[in-house]
Image: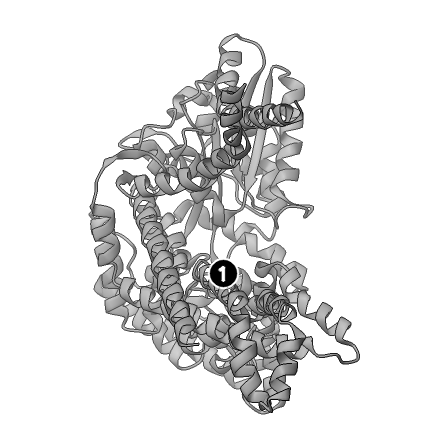
């Protein structure tokens, strides 16, 4: 009798295991059923973390909780579940969600084109009111189009400029920030002689090698694509650019082994007064502030023969997936986000630049952001509308730093080959 | 009633079988299946494409180097770990004042998260402020902080030894404790007999301790082989496999590929899985061969 009981218990346990493993798969279906019934709708949102991670006062969780609480107060029938993922993991985790058929309703991240190409997204017209669309900066909105149809909604943006440490410049006897590559090298030499360990901060490692590289390419009339829209990573201009950079590295005028350094590390070193100049953006200002650096200047980025008349504009996106069919609710949330003060809050909190005309007007009085706001209208962007861009950029993050260590033509040539074939 | 009795074992092992099928077998099948599929970077399955993922993977410029590096990495880390642990286990098996404290101290690297340990070592090796570089500066081994000479993780030739060091550092505690447990099972009278016969200490260690320790040694080394081969956090946290792919092992490559091509990444996982099985088979063969000689 006792044995039988135990056997039954074991069987029961086995059944429970099987049942519980099915349960998790069912929950998505239950949500759908609810929404079609017209009652409470839950929007699942995945967002990238612009802050310093979980637990920090500026974490993405804290920011979105504030936005969502306010939204839910106004729309008691809509619940928004926000999952915040850090930048390093978000692409991979979202890909896993898509692969498993558990797509979010709303995604906020660095690219949209791949999802749009797979026809996973709502058109912008379906989820954003016309008045909000009209308020978007035209150039930004245009970048969100794939084959003439808008899928990506501009979320925030940033622009880049050259930051230089005024104290170190004075110590080295440099009167003003360099405008050309020759001046840059001369300034770096002087800084080196004055005992600065990293005259020019050069982060070409995993974190954002594709940004730093493009800033240099632009200085020599290069870029990732040529005027006709073909990949041109190993164009003669770009090879020349990287050969020049390699010269700086070999002379010990940059961060050592740039191909292994992340921008955050280099910005922190700049904040600590170890770096003479570095390319940065509004989002690096909080890092410099935290490190206690006060006396720094902002200047246009030097190019081969003169300062850049453009800069790198980086644009992040928000988009709506069409799988769960919540267009109405998503529209309410998007309109709430852009017409309320949430969009402005995110700009102030993380020093990101707004993407709407209204937002730019509101921030134009901010002294520190002004140089970047001024640069925005003339910015150059990544070829984000090219669905291959994300894969190319992933590869670039890993290997483009080798171009200042090994043979630039060879390294850029391999990236070009990958871009053409991927 | 009797028929029910016959079914009873099934009820006992059933949950375990179900659990193994769900947790072990299903992911393996899913992994192999994914490696035959064309999956976009955004997770959309676009159909069958065997063997494209594999040809693309084997065609990667750095693939051969990475596989060779992975094997060297495993052999170096496991060999060093076992050698150091054998010595440490012998030491900790002696009675000496403070043994308890020393044994506890050895647990520390094991108890700390591997990722945390790796990040701390990365900080200590920071070219601008790292404590290890400050010591090297004081000792006159480098001229200044912040330069290429202070940046040991920036170049494969100096980064690899550090990666191996950290991997050994985190593997030694477990291995030492496994060997300590093994030492405790060796009966004292065997040693007594050896002493009576006038065997030297070295001879005793070689002919008694090591052979009797073999079961513990085999298990400890085997677990290390698999662990180290699949080890990810140390290399990822300290170098990202950079510069280029020059400090990457196959596990790192698998993770990087996941960012651009999930199918190819799955193919790498399958190759990895095969490698672990092959390495394990070779290892078991070698250790059994030892048994016959002894």
Where residue B10 appears, as percent x and y from the top left, is 50, 30
Q: Residue at the spot x=28%, y=59% of the render?
A: A222
In this rendering, the count of numbered labels is: 1
Which sits in the foreground, A32 or A73? A32
Q: Is residue B274 above or below residue B200?
A: above
Q: Residue at the spot x=51%, y=62% of the render?
A: B219
Which sits in the foreground, B103 or B258? B103
**Residue A136 in sight:** yes
Q: Residue at the spot x=44%, y=20% of the render?
A: A324
Where residue A216 appears, as percent x and y from the top left, is 37, 63
Where residue A314 appears, as percent x and y from the top left, is 43, 47
Badge 1: few (under 14), some or many (20 or more) residues near its Cα, within 10 Å? some
Q: Residue furthest top?
A: A37
- On the rendered image, what quadrant is the N terminus of chain B found in? top right
**Residue indicated by mark 1:** B223
Which sits in the foreground, A171 or A384? A384
Could you tell whether B182 is left or right of B229 in the image? right
> Tag 1, which chain?
B
Residue B292: name its quadrant: bottom left
């Amino acid at each position: 009798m006792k044995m039988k009981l135990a056997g039954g218990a074991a069987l029961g346990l086995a059944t429970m295991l099987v049942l519980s493993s099915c349960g998790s798969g069912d929950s998505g279906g239950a949500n759908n059923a609810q929404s079609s019934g017209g009652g409470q709708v839950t929007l699942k949102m995945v967002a990238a973390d612009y802050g310093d991670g979980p637990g920090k006062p500026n974490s993405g969780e804290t920011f979105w909780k504030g936005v969502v609480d306010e939204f839910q107060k106004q729309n008691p029938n809509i619940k928004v579940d926000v999952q915040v993922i850090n930048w390093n993991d978000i692409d991979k985790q979202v890909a896993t969600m898509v692969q498993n058929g558990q797509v979010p309703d709303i995604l906020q991240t660095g690219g949209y084109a791949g999802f749009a190409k797979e026809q996973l997204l709502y058109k912008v017209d379906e989820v954003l009111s016309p008045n909000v669309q009209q308020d978007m900066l035209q150039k930004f909105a245009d970048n969100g189009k794939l084959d003439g149809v808008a899928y990506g909604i501009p979320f925030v943006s940033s622009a880049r400029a050259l930051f230089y440490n005024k104290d170190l410049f004075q110590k080295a006897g440099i009167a003003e920030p360099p405008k050309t590559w020759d001046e840059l090298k001369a300034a770096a030499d002087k800084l080196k002689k004055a005992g600065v360990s990293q005259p020019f901060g050069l982060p070409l490692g995993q974190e954002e090698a594709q940004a730093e590289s493009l800033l240099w390419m632009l200085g020599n009339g290069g870029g990732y694509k040529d005027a006709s829209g073909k990949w041109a990573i190993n164009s003669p201009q770009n090879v020349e650019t990287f050969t020049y950079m390699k010269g700086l590295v070999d002379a010990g005028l940059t961060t050592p082994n740039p191909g292994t350094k992340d921008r955050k590390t280099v910005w922190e070193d700049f904040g600590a007064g170890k770096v003479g100049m570095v390319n940065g953006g509004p989002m690096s200002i909080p890092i410099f502030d935290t490190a206690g650096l006060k006396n720094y200047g902002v200047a246009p980025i030097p190019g081969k023969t003169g300062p850049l008349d453009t800069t790198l504009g980086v644009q992040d996106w928000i988009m709506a997936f069409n799988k769960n069919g919540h267009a109405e609710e998503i529209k309410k949330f998007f309109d709430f986000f852009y017409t309320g003060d949430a969009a402005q809050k995110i700009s102030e909190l993380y020093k990101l630049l707004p993407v709407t005309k209204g937002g730019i007007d509101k921030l134009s009085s901010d002294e520190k952001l002004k140089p970047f706001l001024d640069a925005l209208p003339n910015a150059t962007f990544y070829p984000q509308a090219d669905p291959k861009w994300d894969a190319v950029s992933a590869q670039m993050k890993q290997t483009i730093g080798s171009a200042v260590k090994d043979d630039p033509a060879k390294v850029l040539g391999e990236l070009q080959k990958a871009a053409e074939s991927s | 009633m009797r028929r029910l009795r016959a079914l009873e074992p099934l009820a006992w092992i059933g949950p375990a079988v179900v659990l193994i099928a769900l947790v072990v077998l299903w992911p393996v099948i899913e992994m192999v299946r994914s490696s035959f599929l064309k999956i976009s970077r955004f997770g959309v399955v676009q159909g069958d494409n065997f063997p494209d993922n594999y040809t693309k993977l084997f065609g990667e410029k750095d693939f051969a180097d990475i596989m060779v590096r992975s094997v060297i990495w495993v052999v170096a880390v496991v060999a060093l770990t076992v050698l150091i642990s054998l010595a440490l286990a012998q030491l900790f098996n002696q009675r000496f004042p403070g043994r308890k404290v020393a044994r506890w101290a050895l647990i520390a690297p094991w108890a700390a998260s591997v990722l945390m340990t790796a990040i701390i070592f990365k900080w200590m090796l920071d070219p601008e402020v790292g404590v290890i570089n400050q010591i090297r500066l004081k000792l006159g081994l480098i001229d200044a902080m912040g330069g290429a000479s202070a940046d040991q993780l920036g170049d494969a030739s100096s980064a690899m030894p550090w990666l191996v060091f950290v991997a050994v550092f985190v593997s030694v505690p477990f291995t030492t404790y496994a060997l300590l447990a093994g030492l405790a099972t060796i009966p004292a009278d065997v040693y007594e007999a050896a002493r009576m016969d006038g065997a030297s200490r070295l001879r005793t260690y070689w002919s008694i301790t090591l052979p009797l320790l073999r079961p513990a040694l085999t298990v400890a080394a085997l677990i290390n082989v698999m662990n180290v081969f699949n080890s990810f956090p140390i290399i990822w946290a300290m170098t990202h496999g950079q510069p280029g792919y020059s400090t990457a092992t196959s596990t790192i490559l698998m993770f990087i590929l996941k960012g651009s091509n999930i199918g190819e990444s799955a193919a790498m996982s399958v190759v990895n899985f095969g490698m672990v099985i092959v390495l394990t088979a070779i290892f078991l063969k070698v250790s059994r061969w030892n048994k016959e000689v002894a």
